[in-house]
Image (cartoon, rainbow, N blue to C red):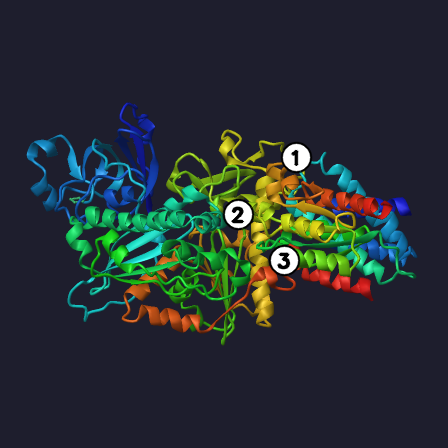
């Protein structure tokens, strides 16, 4: 039965058909599958599959990434309410757009994927001051700070990731958090993330969620 | 407004004319125009003069009067065909020898059928063209009490285009219009890049302001030179210049409020774009008597161009549930709920203007403006009827809707069978009719942003799609948008098409109405007082709506999913 469900779910995700995905999940629940199994045996493998396919599938476009990440996030969110025990959280990330940047959609895909992968995502919203990134990361005991910037001047400017790095340095917090950046400008120059003071970057939202999970593990291991 | 169209073809002088071009169809006539440089086909409305027909293209005749036959500059050589007989003006301006050689005045010449002319002396190349008459809205109003200084200029300052109209305010008569590129585009197509450049260096700000101001006066001078015949004395007769635009353009025009605009925290508030150096403007424009009026923009992200749209369409005069869309680089949306004007803007992406689309282009000659399904083939209709050079917004909408209807593109935006990097050609013989996967993606994101913005305002007014009673679509789609197709893929809501109005240049029209009323600025202020502006990047729920609207299907079909997903929670 599991194979059939996985196949039907993957098909629905490939078609970015949220209704169809929900129907598969509903049917699985009706057949006695647990919410835990749906997340760990169906949803997460589907995302991992998408991550490994993303570089091989040039036809998948941004619109489709938005929709697939949304499906994963919504299904997971609803399944979590049915979990018998609260699930073990992989880690925690604070995410927001750089100061001066109002492009909120850029971080949507990565947030959707992360939620489905059991990463606790604290969304700080748009136009976030550098201090707030650090303060919230401390207060929430996060492992990763993710700064999204869609414009050249917010991606490299003084108020964005660079300032977050500076504050981390000043407060001696550099070992405690990893800083990742994302957004269109970093794609045009794959060394730009270094100039922005980041530890890592990712070219798209789906890959970013994988990089973030790796960074979380890195911090937890240290 | 249904007009019969005739076709004009323009060839280079060296080219021979294929004889089948001089055909004699019933509704369509063919005028072949030889010029020194180019070969075009353009459509001519029945009754339109050849000059007017050419004025909306890059191939203008010389002219120094308003087409009254008085300047004699617009000479063309008639080779043959069915045209109107020479007018008295032509007998007066052209010698018998010239007439025997086929000379005609383009402003007097009209098509009766197929014809052929030579453009021996075209006007020097110019950025400025007349706005196609079908895109203009009749602006009611006049100022009979205006005894002197009766002229006025309306300006719609857009990110990519500037539109200008010269009016006789006293008699309420539009003398001519022009549109052309905003020269600030050289500093970045993106508004924020321009703002950033201006913020970083004051001298750059001054330069950008000057560029926009000189473009405005160039357009006015072009009108005066070609449609009036006198420039400098007429500039002094101008009593008002009324300027609307998006907030960033107004800030860059006046070098005011730029710092506020770069900081998103200020986007929701009013931005002061009142010029401080008007004396300099008067001097630069040679318009010593002009009152320069720039109504205050609504907020950082909603300009006075939206207020102009509201005035032009009379949105608040209509029933509650009247919605307005002004589609452009930034799409602005307004909803009238009977009490409040809810407005917002959304960076829908300039896909509807052809930007970011492989073969996208503005609505210019050669742009595919509509596509029809012709028994399994795709019949592409272009502006001017010439060979397709790419898609404008309405053609792109048709193409994608038909590809979805035919099962070639799925609702997800994915091609059923990948067409490869070259895309799917609607006309296999013409690669510029291709739609790529990325084109579909850009379109999906633009239409989702538009639909989500409309839905967000409806939610804010506690209304539903079914409460809509009127929808005015202004801007980039012009008047050629196919409503059924736009509804089928969720660009427009599935309401009775009779409730949908297509306006092209509504902001210019609103600006013109202000120019023709004694208190234009006051009318803008009265509308502005009813406006409640929402910044979508701060609005809860907008992102979910956006993602829900990405699929290529009618708006409202996802109401079904709300039902299904609520079962999950139960
Ligand atoms: S005579 Fe034709 S434009 Fe002046």
Q: Residue at x 47, y 61 (%)?
A: B302
> In the figure, residue B248 lies in which quadrant?
bottom left
Q: Position of residue B143 (x, y in %)?
A: 22, 68
Residue B189 position within the rendered picture, expressed as x and y whole percent measured from the top left: 46, 45
Q: Which residue was labeled with disc 1?
A: B418
Residue with the mark numbered 2: B397
Of badges 3 and 2, nearer the viewer stands 3
Q: Chain of mark 3?
A: A
The location of residue B93, given as percent across then percent down, is 9, 41
**Secondary-structure class at tag 3:** loop
Label 3 belongs to which residue? A129
Instruction: Name which of mark 1 and mark 2 comes first in the sequence.
Output: 2
* Front residue of this view, candidates B68 and B81: B68
Mark 3–mark 2 Cα distance, whole angstroms, equals 40 Å
- Return the chain for callout 1: B
Q: Quadrant of residue A156?
A: top right
Disc marking residue B243: none
Secondary-structure class at tag 1: loop
| Marks 1 and 2 on same chain | yes
Alpha-carbon span between mark 1 and mark 3 = 43 Å
Work out which quarter of the rendered image holds the C terminus of chain B and state it.
bottom right
Taking the image as shown, residue B327 lies to the left or right of residue A202, namely left
């Amino acid at each position: 039965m599991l194979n059939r469900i996985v196949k039907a779910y993957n098909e629905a995700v490939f078609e970015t058909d949220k209704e169809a995905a929900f129907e598969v999940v509903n049917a699985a629940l009706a057949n006695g599958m647990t919410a835990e199994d749906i997340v760990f045996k169906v949803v997460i493998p589907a995302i991992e599959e998408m991550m490994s396919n993303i570089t091989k599938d040039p036809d998948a476009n941004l619109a489709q990434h938005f929709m697939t990440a949304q499906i994963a996030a919504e299904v997971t969110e609803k399944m979590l309410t049915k979990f018998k025990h609260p699930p073990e959280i992989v880690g925690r990330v604070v995410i927001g757009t750089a100061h001066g940047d109002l492009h909120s959609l850029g971080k949507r895909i990565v947030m959707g994927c992360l939620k489905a992968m059991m990463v606790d995502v604290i969304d700080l919203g748009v136009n976030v001051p550098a201090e707030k990134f650090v303060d919230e990361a401390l207060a929430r005991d996060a492992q990763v700070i993710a700064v999204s910037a869609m414009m050249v001047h917010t991606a490299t400017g003084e108020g964005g990731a660079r300032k977050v790095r500076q504050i981390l340095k000043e407060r001696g917090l550099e070992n405690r958090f990893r800083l990742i950046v994302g957004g269109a400008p970093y794609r045009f120059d794959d060394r730009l993330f270094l100039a922005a003071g980041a530890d890592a970057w990712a070219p798209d939202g789906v890959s970013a969620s994988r990089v973030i999970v790796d960074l979380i593990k890195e911090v937890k291991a240290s | 407004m249904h007009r019969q169209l005739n076709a004009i073809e323009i060839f280079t002088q060296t080219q021979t004319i294929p004889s089948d071009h001089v055909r004699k169809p019933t509704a369509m006539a063919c005028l072949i125009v030889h010029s020194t440089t180019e070969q075009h086909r353009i459509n001519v409305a029945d009754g339109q003069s050849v000059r007017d027909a050419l004025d909306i293209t890059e191939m203008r005749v010389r002219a120094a009067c308003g087409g009254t036959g008085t300047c004699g500059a617009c000479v063309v050589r008639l080779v043959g065909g069915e045209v109107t007989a020479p007018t008295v003006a032509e007998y007066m301006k052209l010698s018998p020898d010239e007439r025997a050689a086929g000379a005609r005045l383009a402003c007097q010449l009209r098509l009766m059928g197929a014809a052929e002319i030579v453009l021996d002396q075209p006007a020097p190349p110019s950025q400025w063209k007349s706005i196609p008459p079908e895109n203009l809205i009749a602006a009611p109003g006049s100022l009979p009490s205006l005894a002197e200084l009766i002229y006025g200029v309306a300006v719609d300052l857009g990110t990519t285009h500037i539109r200008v109209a010269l009016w006789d305010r006293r008699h309420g008569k539009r003398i001519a219009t022009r549109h052309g590129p905003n020269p600030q585009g050289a500093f970045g197509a993106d508004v924020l890049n321009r703002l950033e450049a201006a913020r970083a260096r004051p001298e750059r700000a001054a330069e950008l302001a000057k560029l926009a101001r000189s473009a405005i006066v160039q357009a006015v001078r072009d009108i005066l030179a070609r449609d009036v015949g006198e420039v400098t004395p007429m500039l002094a007769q101008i009593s008002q210049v009324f300027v609307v635009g998006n907030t960033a353009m107004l800030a860059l025009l006046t070098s005011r409020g730029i710092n506020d605009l770069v900081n998103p925290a200020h986007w929701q508030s009013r931005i002061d774009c009142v010029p401080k150096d008007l004396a300099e403007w008067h001097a630069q424009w040679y318009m010593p008597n002009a009152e320069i009026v720039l109504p205050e923009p609504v907020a950082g992200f909603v300009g006075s161009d939206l207020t102009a749209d509201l005035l032009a369409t009379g949105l608040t005069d209509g029933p509650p549930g009247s919605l307005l869309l002004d589609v452009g680089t930034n799409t602005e949306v307004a909803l009238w709920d009977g009490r409040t004007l809810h407005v917002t803007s959304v960076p829908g992406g300039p896909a509807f203007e052809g930007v970011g689309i492989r073969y996208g282009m503005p609505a210019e000659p050669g742009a595919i403006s509509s596509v029809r399904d012709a028994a399994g083939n795709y019949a592409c209709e272009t502006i001017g009827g010439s060979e397709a050079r790419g898609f404008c917004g309405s053609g792109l909408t048709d193409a994608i809707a038909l590809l979805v209807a035919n099962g070639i593109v799925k609702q997800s935006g994915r091609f059923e069978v990948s067409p490869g990097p070259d895309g799917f050609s609607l006309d296999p013989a013409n690669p510029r009719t291709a739609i790529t996967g990325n084109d579909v993606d850009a379109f999906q994101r633009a239409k989702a942003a538009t639909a989500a913005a409309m839905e967000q305002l409806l939610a804010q007014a506690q209304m539903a799609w079914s409460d809509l009673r009127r929808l005015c679509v202004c801007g980039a789609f012009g008047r050629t948008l196919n409503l059924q197709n736009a509804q089928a893929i969720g660009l427009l809501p599935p309401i009775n098409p009779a409730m949908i109005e297509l306006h092209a240049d509504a902001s210019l029209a609103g600006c013109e109405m202000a120019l023709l009323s004694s208190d234009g600025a006051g009318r803008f202020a009265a509308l502005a007082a009813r406006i409640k502006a929402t910044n979508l990047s701060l609005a809860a729920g907008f992102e979910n709506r956006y993602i829900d609207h990405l699929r290529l299907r009618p708006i409202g079909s996802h109401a079904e999913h709300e039902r299904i997903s609520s079962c999950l929670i139960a």
